[in-house]
Image: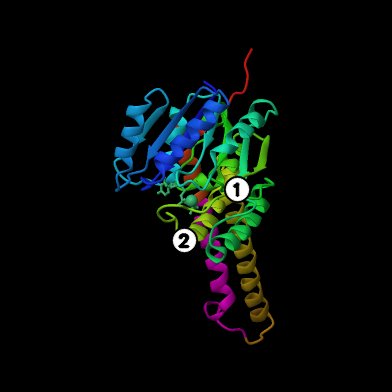
Amino acid sequence: MDISIIVPLYNEAESLPKLYEWIARVMKENKFSYEVIFVNDGSTDDSWQVIEDLNKADDKHVHAISFRRNYGKSAALYCGFKAAKGDVVITMDADLQDSPDEIPELFKMIKEEGFDLVSGWKKKRYDNKFTKNIPSKLFNATARKVTGIKLHDMNCGLKAYRNEVVKNIEVFSEMHRYIPYLAKNAGFTKIGEKVVQHRKREFGTSKFGLNRFVNGYLDLMTLWFLNKFGKQPMHFFGLIGSLMFMLGFIAIIVVGAMKLYALYHGHHAMLVANNPYFHLSILSMVLGCMLFLAGFLGELIIRNSQSRNDYLIAKEI
Ligand code: UDP
Ligand code: MG
């Protein structure tokens, strides 16, 4: 099969018939063999009935998964990825903001130009300027710095992947915003970008509020940490812990030495316990020990987890 199209959706009943009709038209025109996998993320409207009708009319191409409750876009993509059988996997939003007309070109970039992943770039965006477009520019600038991937629109819903890529990444919690980074960390480094048309939302409302930006930044930190120290937390906690402990230890020796020096020379010296540096030194040593322990605990957890040896093997002969 050429293409699997994965469509995560949450309360998008009005858009679905039009979306599917459009996809089917593009697929037919280009003679692709394809499947569409709708992932119903616990919709409370009649999205699922609409999908059932689509499936009745065309059960060769329409597949669907329905969650019992709303788990979020990442979970929907994760399950879609597991089910995808096509050589090229396309993800797109259900709200008609992404255009199926882009699919043939994306397909070509994966198949012929050898990209692992191609991300859409909504260069001209039809969203609210203040709640989305401007914050999104800032968000992408940070993401570029932290991830080292030069994409203008990392969180674009319209993306294309080589099948192997989606089978080897795990999109969890809200990490759908950083799939290119997940792919890069898994060793799929040929990541491209294509300017795509963007359209106004025709039906319903956006499913993400402004908290997307707060969560987005926190998730970026998590991914950065996991990538750098996920397999060796001691290298992070141990280093900071040791530094803090040493700092406190040296400081406390200085405090003690100054007291002895003053006593020896008969100068007036305050009680060590009244010296603020004494308390700061102790605090630093205690914190250092705690960080060190956190490192050990992290290592213990990893030793006992299944994921410690999940090396991705590209080829074997
Ligand atoms: N979506 C989802 N689960 C959620 C939230 C959103 O599957 O919990 C889907 C939604 O139905 C749409 C896509 O993710 O197909 C993108 O959502 P939306 O259009 O609301 O995001 P925006 O375009 O505002 O960034
Ligand atoms: Mg949208």
- Residue 307 seen anywhere in this rendered image of the structure: no
**Total marks drawn?**
2
Q: Quadrant of the C terminus?
A: top right
Q: Quadrant of residue 53?
A: top left
Q: Which residues are magenta?
A: 269-293
Which of the pair 263/219 is nearer the observer? 219
Position above or below: 250 against 183: below
Residue occupying the point 66% across, 85% down: 266
Instruction: State the SS at label 2.
Output: helix
Which of the pair 252/4 is nearer the observer? 4
Left/right of residue 120 with respect to residue 47 in the rendered view:
right
Q: Amino acid at mark 2?
A: Asn
Instruction: State the SS at label 1.
Output: loop
The spot of residue 81 in percent (x, y) is 47, 32
Q: Quadrant of residue 39?
A: top left
Residue under label 1, please give it.
154
For residue 211, the mark is: 2
Which of the pair 272/10 is nearer the observer? 10
Count neighbours of disc 1 (C-alpha within 10 A) and say few if under 14, some if 14 to 19, many if 20 or more: many
Q: From this viewpoint, which residue is outermost toward the top?
A: 317
Mark 2 or mark 1: which comes first in sequence? 1
Position above or below: 73 against 190: below
